[in-house]
Amino acid sequence: MKGLTAPRWFAGRARLPRGEGPWPWLVAGSVALSLLMLLALVLLLAVRGLGHFWPSPVALVSLEDGSQLAGVKVREERRFDGAGSEWLLRTANRDLEGGIWQWVAVDAIESVSHPQDLVVMSRTRWGDFIGRLVALEDASGNQQEQAAWNAFEARLAEIQALRDERDRLRGDVVLPLVRRLERGLDSEARERLAAANARIRGLQRQMIGETLILESADGQRLAQPIEQVLRAWRPNAMSLPDKLGAWSRGVWRFLSEGPRAANTGGGVWPAIFGTVLMVLLMSVLVTPFGVLAGIYLNEVAHQGRLTRVVRIAVRNLAGVPSIVYGVFGLGVFVHGIGGTLDTWFFSDQLPSPTFGTGGLLWASLTLALLTLPVVIVATEEGLARVPEHQREGALALGATRLEMLARVVLPMTVPAMLTGVILAVARAAGEVAPLMLVGVAKLAPQVPVDGDFPFLHLDRKFMHLGYHIFDVAFHGGDVQAAMPLVYATALLLVLVILVLNLTAIFLRHHLKMRHVALPRH
Amino acid sequence: MIEPTPPVATSSNATPLGKRFRQGRDRLATALITAGGIGVILAVLAIGVFLAIEVVPLFMSSAEVPFQDLSPLIWGTLKAACFALLFAVPVALGAAMHSSVFMSRRLRSRIKPTLELMEALPGVVIGFVAGLVLAPYVERHLAGALSLLVVMPVCVLLAGALWSWLPPRMRRLLPLGWAGLWLVPWLALWVGVALFLSPWIETQLFNGDLRGWLDSRFGLDYSARNALIVGLAMGFAVIPGIYALAEDALSGVPGHLGEGAEALGATRWQTLWKVVLPAAGPGLFSAVMIGAGRAVGETMIVLMVSGNTALMSLSPLEGMRSLAASIAIELPEAAPGEIHYRLLFLAALLLFIFTFLVNTLAEVVRERLRGRYRRLGGGS
Amino acid sequence: MSVSSPSRPATAGPFIDFESHDSCLEIEGLSLAYAGKAALSELTLKVPRHRVTAFIGPSGCGKSTLLRALNRLHDLNEEVDFSGRILLDGQDIHAPEVAVSELRRRVGMVFQMPNPFPMSIYDNVAFGLRLQGGMRKRQMDDIVEWALSSAALWHEVKDRLRASAWSLSGGQQQRLVIARTLAVRPEVLLLDEPASALDPISTLKIEELIRNLKTQLTLVLVTHNMQQAARVSDYTAFLQEGELVEYGATDTLFTNPRLARTENYITGRMA
């Protein structure tokens, strides 16, 4: 039977003496494809996310019809009708133009230059301005045109110092006093509050005064009150070190400031804080319970059919979609336990819920439940790796089971448990769907930790990096304007998760090494 | 050598009281661990029970319950999962075959953790990139994107053909064991070429308007958020999971099986195809099952990429709305206890039951497979 | 050592005369089954105090099972059916008032695979002492030194007591395990093929150690190596298929076995 087919088959092989045929190349290609996609994604995030903070040059574009435009070139795109391509320019100046984007056909461009005097300003109202600084006008109307830029920069630094002082006063003095007053009448607090408010008003008065006379590329003039300007820079005039400095300050502001302009500007500090706090709480909850259940399953439970079924069930729960956990959290924690807590302890505040709505505690509990299988499985695997003769050695010396576990087995399992917890944290940090049901917020100006008793507010909603991405990218007004920020946030989230996972991989490797060192003769 | 009299050990704990204390502590700890362990496990297992209890009133109520509202969602869920698997299964299984048989050990020990990291990428990031970057791009460059489906395999095969004509010295520099790595720039090059040339091809073949041509020829309506993009994004998300399990199954096949075939003169590919794959078949099946479970339950990617319109169409160029996405969108607004709220709980219960069953099936199959390998003397 | 000729009929099973020794362990009608499969059936024998008793027999004859039963290590396994009695100094080790951890302190055990814990040499030896608790540092140092000396390891490790126990060679690890067991002052030491994983020189050291230790305690040795049994033991029991075939003084058993089964085994193996 085989004899008939063999010669033909052999002949086929003879034509490709060394080769294995096309299939090995196709499967190698699928490895390459996976790597390529991963690489492309990571590169995209890194380039766009980090590039956002780079002070990119501003182009002055002269069109054939004689008009001029100043803006940052975002990308070049082929036109839908196939007739050439066009540039997308971010021209800013919402107050003058009504929008901040301009499409310019490449064919219509006459010349492009990068004059050094083009200024980019980030303002508290109307977004960015791109154009020229004509003059600095002080309160009495005297215009200064010579060296206006230097005077403006110096004044901007002063205003920034005043602004910082005002924010500090608001956060550290006014807010606690207001909370104190909310709890009861207190004449001393009232006086101090009045004093602080007066001081803030004084600071704000000091900020106003000068007005900037600005001119856009197409010649429109604008009087800009100086206190509304946050930062200003002339990207075409900056040297590389200047740009690097500006870049790193931009990164720092992104990490340390709160969001502005309906989440499309500013930083993500509250989201970082919320993510980290929620994940910390979750790991505090998941570690003891997960380890306990793992020890029970592997060391205490009767190793029969029931235990095997339970083990498979626990493993499978790791594959249950996270949104299902979210539904469970909403039904049990928020509406069930939270609602009951409200009627028992916070009935004076009803119908506005305290714990009967999504919050930090319920989010952490839900994610703890979600990641419990991860920790249980990791603990069990670690315990199963401890050689039986180590256990017997401890027992043979007269150790009780508890002593054997505590002194020999568990110390050897610590890296495995740690790996499990870190993997759980990495999973929880990237999980968004369940949070949408149990307590994440678009914008939570108050972080859940402050100087106010009980310091950690488990009932508050919080911001989350992952949800921030979703919200800004899909619910924001101008997605195009928010994109760079979303890229940066996504990069940050990926970096956090990457670091956590690398730690887990390192630990697991370390664990394997240690067990290789076990005596095997 | 032996000292005649050992030092006297007096020990407080050696008294009967001390012994009783140790025994008692042991018993107490065992009881606590048992109670805690059982408690935790019950809490975790309570999820399914709770969902079921919440859903029961739907079937008891006298009012009309719009169960049919769920059918387009179930359809959308399955459609999204199918497209994801259509993309992910060949790539993941191919990658697993390559890395278990052909790849060099050193590269493999790096690639596996890398793909594990790929699995850790959060859905919301993948969804963002697919929904806001990829979807608009493909909308503008549909021809280029579709041409990649042909260009990729062809360029890999071209690489294979070129390779066999290379002089032996060059071939040693670019071994098949490292092809997974050195094919990456090659692929990138051809992707670039394909995207660059596709406008010209589109002009030649479809009058420069592929979407118009598709519409007039097949009546296919193009929407920017469509099943193709969902499949690509979610496929990307489930590839590493399927790959890891499939790789374990393939490399767990006892070595002497394959060696036997190779000793008879089979090539490595023939050995893989005829001996290793059939042996590891159940493992591959369970890997795909677990991938399917993940694709069905993935929320953020579908939410951000699918467009969330409850359509019941087969077209790969139209969007859908899935169970998980509906829960995420509608549940925060539903009032507890009302029919809509319970209907969404029913959706969650369906997801739970489906993934639980699929995973159990996969786990049982894997368990059997492990037993089979052990009997074959492999020991994975 | 006076072992007289048989004074009971051979059908009553193997026997030994203990007129000159009191017995430390007495096994009476011990039967043991794993998951329904019999491993030991109706075993009765006495282990003399301050002597080395060896159990020999083909693989799977139940000699290791018997040894583990003496330490109640089968408590770990829930599928074991058990009947009969084991007396340690006249007390049933399965009696409810006997705490299993205390029994295991009194009956130490050394396994085939050296199993030092992943801690320092000192901590390994002090492990059992710390379980008892309430001991001063100075006292503990003394006992650790004594135990290591008793196991003929002190001179090799006295300068690196804080080093990891896993840095020792296999033979040293096995002697460390013996030292660790000696430190809790057991009355009986069970050795389950203690030298089978070691090189010949380490094996000789362990054998010498076994011979020396019998001045302090009772030793029970399981080995598949008959030369070893002949070299170190005073009494030898030959087991086959879970039954005790013959039990007697080592010299007699090896040179002049009573039963043909024993002779076949010994000559077959030794030839």
Image (cartoon, rainbow, N blue to C red):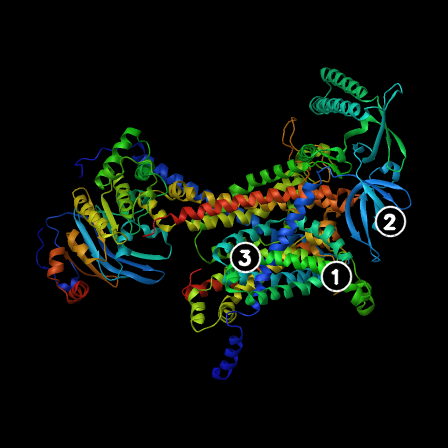
* Amino acid residing under circle 3: Ala
Q: Chain of mark 1?
A: B
Corner quadrant of residue B149: bottom right
* Amino acid residing under circle 2: Ala
Cα separation, mark 3 vs mark 2, equals: 53 Å
Residue B134 as seen in the image, left or right of residue A145: left
- Which residue in the structure is indicated by mark 1? B198
Residue B32 as seen in the image, left or right of residue B347: left
Q: Position of residue A233 (x, y in %)?
A: 76, 32
Residue C131 as seen in the image, left or right of residue A329: left
The residue under the point 18% across, 55% down is: C229
Cα separation, mark 1 vs mark 2, equals: 25 Å
Task: Check disc 1 and report its element: helix, strand or loop.
Answer: helix
Q: Quadrant of the C terminus of chain C?
A: bottom left
Task: Check disc 3 and report its element: helix, strand or loop.
Answer: helix
Q: Position of residue A157 (x, y in %)?
A: 74, 24
Q: Chain of mark 3?
A: B
- Which residue in the structure is indicated by mark 3? B244
Can residue A467 be seen in this snapshot?
A: no
- Which residue in the structure is indicated by mark 2? A108
Q: Position of residue C48 (x, y in %)?
A: 16, 49
Nearest the eye: A159 or B314: A159
Nearest the eye: A155 or A217: A217
Mark 1 or mark 3: which comes first in sequence? 1
